Image: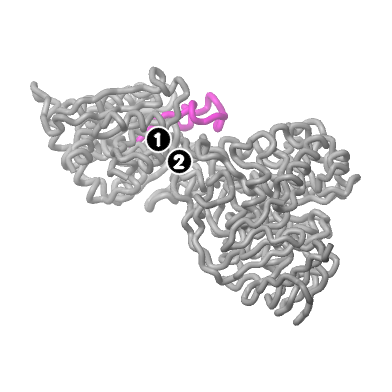
Amino acid sequence: MPVRRLLIRNGRVVDPASGRDEIADVLVEEGRIAGVGRNLEVAGAEVFDATGWVVAPGFIDLHVHLREPGFEHAETIETGSRAAAAGGFTSICAMPNTAPVNDNPTVTRYIIERARRFAVTHVFPIGAITKDSAGEELAAIGSMKAAGAVAISDDGRPVMNARVMRRAMETARSFGLPVIDHCEDLHLSAGGDMHEGVVSARLGLRGIPSCSEDVMVARDILLAEVTGAQFHVAHISSRRSVELVAEARRRGLPVTCEATPHHIALTDADMAPYDSNYKMKPPLRTACDVAALVGGLAEGVIDAIATDHAPHPGSEKMQEFEQCPFGIIGLETALAVALEVLYHTGKVSLLRLVELFTLGPARILHLDRGRLAAGAPADVTIFDPERVWTYDVSRSFSKSSNTPFHGRSFRGGPVATIVGGQLVWHFEEGLKVAR
Amino acid sequence: MAAGLLGIEELSREEIEAILERAKDFQPVQNQTFKRLDILRGKMIVNLFYEASTRTRTSFEIAAKRLGADAISITAAGSSVAKGESLVDTLNTLAAMRPSAIVMRHWASGAPHFLARHLPIPIINAGDGTHEHPTQALLDARTILDCRGTLEGLRVAIIGDIAHSRVARSNIHLLSKFGARIVLCGPASLAPPELARIAPGVEITYDMSEAIRDADVIMMLRVQLERQHEAAFPAGEYFQFYGLRLEHLELARPNVIVMHPGPINRGREISSEVADSQRSVILNQVENGVAVRMAVLERILCQ
């Protein structure tokens, strides 16, 4: 059988691991990167002309809700991974809040098996911290790791009992797993529907105060210090939380965090009144918080951009605001939003921006991905920082359409997604294969 | 979106003045023997109430009938809502019967705004959650004007559970647009500082005497236990520190008026002596409710 070769020619190769940012060719052979260099001449290789585009390591989203098993009316592993590919992601991590909850190796293996059959990207499951994410009894953490889980989290249902969290961190440390916490003190946030501030006061909506996030970030940092566990803050959104993480890092603690595209692009004041496409947890906060997030992304306190892609069917989002579930989809718009907020404003270099989507999340999860080096898996994201396009959610690969970015025009977006050496999505040709 | 009335915040001073002026024309109708006009003859108004209400619902109904319209009232408890129908489906069903307007009260802030985005029928907000109660602010303004002739420069103390009060929010917006000085007063948990920033000319104090000093108008609010979901203030201490008693009135301007949107809880936020005193205009407020709602209905349905 002939060796399958793909030559990605003449793109601007941006690889944070090596610091490379230059026009070069990338050669892919049998699902692995075979070489990166100028004017590679390879006989018999299929050629992908990337002139004018950026060629980056495959994007990794460490925070995605795929809703399968249990909520297949909202999303499936297949549809979610397709949306991911259309957003330039080659790897996505599935949060465990499915039904049943991914709190044991059977569910972990089920997700991996479904992904093997139906996903067009890599899918890495994240296991629950506690059984049924009820916050009481530890889940089968070691067995889930053995089955393929890359982290643990009770995302959406944070562990309120500090003692349970301590034990979870000790267990996670024993198995070398990062603990991802959705930091929210549920007593402080109870009943809240949006950020507590002037806008919530005006709209008569109950608030989710920033301190409900900050106290949990502080608690978890202290517990991480005691246990030596690796602690990762999911969707960090408040200025004070960024400061807390920065301080923990100065003290040398293994604390990392991620920010979502919507939290850096929108504030509570941007919310269309009572439009549930702006309702998520943590809530959209203030311009001051946004500035702290952008600063954190630029300076390195924030390690990754993650979407918190959270599909909900239209019927659930078409209700009284306070009845609507939290969360928005985000895989297809993440890169475009990040380019707009971080790169085109001159706040973040292209190298750093790519790092936030690749090496950053790979390091947090200890994945051997996110680099364009010989021998690495051939996951490649090709994007155009300049292409002007408009997001039409009715053409989304996701089963759900809950997004505040419908109809928004962007400067820059994904062009092609290559997973394991195979082109799976192209911006003009659409989805290429069902793997 | 069909033009209804969702809140005071988005109205201009001129629009508010027009309603208040027109309401004045309707005030004498109350005293006429034959009270029915035919301005809205042939129109049909649906009152859809997802929350308990006595005065608002009755006065909208009376206002509609005095203008010659047909009015029907639906309460959530006795309708398909109780069978689990969603808000959108209920409203679509009602809209299919082609009413001229829907007057709506709902426990969720923004419910009328959400519906106004999806329905081609004018929606009149008769109170949404803890957001706005525009016709209450209009009738309050009409009542103050009847007593004082102007809103400009008046010192208005709004006292009680501001955080959960839609009446307070609508009044803050309205009074602010007319240049009144507004003092909000309540325990910190019920008078959050952000509320002072929703409109110009608003300050907050936690001290009742300070709020009442030199006040031209005192608006008392009910403690909305049903919306609090928690004990935000020590039970049993409320009346002692935030209940309006006769001795407070001595701090205010001599001709101060005391208002309350009702229902009043005697002995909780207001003493009986104050509620029944010469300074109380609580029943004038109720009376003006009909005239103001006639003006609102006419404005929306005769465009």
The image position of residue B190, as x and y in percent, is 50, 37
Q: Quadrant of residue A17?
A: bottom right
Query: Please, which colouring scheme is shown?
Result: one colour
B270 vs B48, nearest the viewer: B48
- Report crowding for label 2: few under 14, some 14 to 19, many 20 or more residues within 10 A (C-alpha): many
Q: Residue at x 61, y 48 (%)?
A: A210
Residue A36 lies, with reference to residue A82, above or below; the image says below
Left or right of A229, for residue A218: left
CA gap, disc 1 to disc 2? Answer: 9 Å
Q: In which quarter of the image is the C terminus of chain B?
A: top left
Q: Which of A200 and A9 is in front in this view?
A: A9
Q: Any mark on residue A204, and which?
A: 2
Q: Is residue A90 above or below residue B239?
A: below
Q: Which residue is drawn at 48% across and 26% down?
A: B226
For the residue labelled by badge 1, is the local secondary structure a helix, a strand or a loop?
Answer: strand
Q: Residue B290 carries which label?
A: none
Q: What residue type is labelled 2?
A: Gly
Q: In which quadrant will I find the N terminus of chain B?
A: top left
- Chain letter of the residue carrying label 2: A
Q: Viewer-proximal residue, A276 or A162?
A: A276
| Location of residue A318 in the rendering, given as x and y in whole percent from the top left corner | 47, 38
